[in-house]
């Protein structure tokens, strides 16, 4: 072969190579390009401040699920270290510390920050609000994520759904509650909007940190307390000093936890790391509800075996609480533009969703849970 032909051959081969690669399929392309890409990606270490104590292992664990997955997806190059509530920053100032960049990210719940804007409640839960499934649906397939992101953007934060407890229990009562009148003067540990609604029903809501509840309940400084559900409640031993265990926790029908990321830090991430974080957050979000749905049933059975008396809230309490809640939302919507914008969409989504869920879903689960062969109903 002449020299000129050799050069021509080499040139043709070089030109042909990208064409061969392009035809090799996505899998082969990824294999070819990922070692190179990974070598180019930076090592990044972030700190995530959680609002939660390690004792709430299912909720706290949501952040660990995220951090482990992010690390694996990036070949260990993007590391996120988790700090329990109070370890690095005060548990209830996670939002502030992510906003000002003290920490790159956090794991918290929007309803801790309703003092800044009542609309933060939509990031978690409102009384008589969405179930876990409805919250997920509103966030990921409805307008929930878009609308809450507009709110968080005002605080330099990008938010991601980060777990759900499912419907919570109504809590522990030292004496039986037979009607709405029994709530009058009742000292109950119930923070947030649930507490505000309870106060409209005549109760005296208190905000008490987790560790202080038991002794106060024991000596009668509290008549009742709510916490989470059977799995978490059992660990705090409330059943020893308050044997009536009420349901449902109508103020937390499907509370969502969230990951918060400082907006500038988020924008500084390589695209592949952003994708890793998004995927890991989605996994943590789904995983927490699955964990609770597995842990709560045996915990409830254990409590009942110990003599705990399960009680449904009397109907008149449910009806009055529902009425007071929607009056509260109308008042908020009248004075808070952001609340009104999100509430309008949320309410429409909720009401439409009920039209569907009350048909097949409700008929199916009601039959499954209550039918006993041979028993007349
Ligand atoms: Ca609760």
Image (cartoon, rainbow, N blue to C red):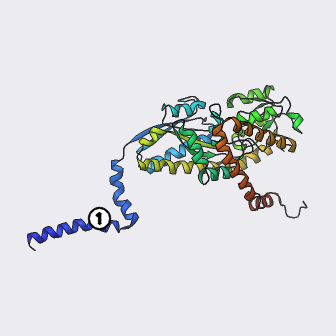
Quarter-wise, where is residue 77 in the image? Answer: top left
Q: Is residue 100 left or right of residue 202?
A: left
Q: Position of residue 354 (x, y in %)?
A: 74, 54
Visible residue check, residue 355: yes
- For numbered disc 1, what is the local secondary structure? helix
Q: Position of residue 149 (x, y in %)?
A: 56, 43
Quadrant housing the C terminus: bottom right
Quadrant housing the N terminus: bottom left
Name the residue carrying label 1.
18
Q: Residue at x 49, y 47 (%)?
A: 277
Number of numbered discs: 1
Residue farthest to the bottom?
A: 1
Check the image and report above or below for 192 versus 219. Answer: below
Q: Nearer the viewer, residue 12 or 104?
A: 12
Q: Residue at x 52, y 46 (%)?
A: 66
Quarter-wise, where is residue 315 in the image? Answer: top right
């Amino acid at each position: 072969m002449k020299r000129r032909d050799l050069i021509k051959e080499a040139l043709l081969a070089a030109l042909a190579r990208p064409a061969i690669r392009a035809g090799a399929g996505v899998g082969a392309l990824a294999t070819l390009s990922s070692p190179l890409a990974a070598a180019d990606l930076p090592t990044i270490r972030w700190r995530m401040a959680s609002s939660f104590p390690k004792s709430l292992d299912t909720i706290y664990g949501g952040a660990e699920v995220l951090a482990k997955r992010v690390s694996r997806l990036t070949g260990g190059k993007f590391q996120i270290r988790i700090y329990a509530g109070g370890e690095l920053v005060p548990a209830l100032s996670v939002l502030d510390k992510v906003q000002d960049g003290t920490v790159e990210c956090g794991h918290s719940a929007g309803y801790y920050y309703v003092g800044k804007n009542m609309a933060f409640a939509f990031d978690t839960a409102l009384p008589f609000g969405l179930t876990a499934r409805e919250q997920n649906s509103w966030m990921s397939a409805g307008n929930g994520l878009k609308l809450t992101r507009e709110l968080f953007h005002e605080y330099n934060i990008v938010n991601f759904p980060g777990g759900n407890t499912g419907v919570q229990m109504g809590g522990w009562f030292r004496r039986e509650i037979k009607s709405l009148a029994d709530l009058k003067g009742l000292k109950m540990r119930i923070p947030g909007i649930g507490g505000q609604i309870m106060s409209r029903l005549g109760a005296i809501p208190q905000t008490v940190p987790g560790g202080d509840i038991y002794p106060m309940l024991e000596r009668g400084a509290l008549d009742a307390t709510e916490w989470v559900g059977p799995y978490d409640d059992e660990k705090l031993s409330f059943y020893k000093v308050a044997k009536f265990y009420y349901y449902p926790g109508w103020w937390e029908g499907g509370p969502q936890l969230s990951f918060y990321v400082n907006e500038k830090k988020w924008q500084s991430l390589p695209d592949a790391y952003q994708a890793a974080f998004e995927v890991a957050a989605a996994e943590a979000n789904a995983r927490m509800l699955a964990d609770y749905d597995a842990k709560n049933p045996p915990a409830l059975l254990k409590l009942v075996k110990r003599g705990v008396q399960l009680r449904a809230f009397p109907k008149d309490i449910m009806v009055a609480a529902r009425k007071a809640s929607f009056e509260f939302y109308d008042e908020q919507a009248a004075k808070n533009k952001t609340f009104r914008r999100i509430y309008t969409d949320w309410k429409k989504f909720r009401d439409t969703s009920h039209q569907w869920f009350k048909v097949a879903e409700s008929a199916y689960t009601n039959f499954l849970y209550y039918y006993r062969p041979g028993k007349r109903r």
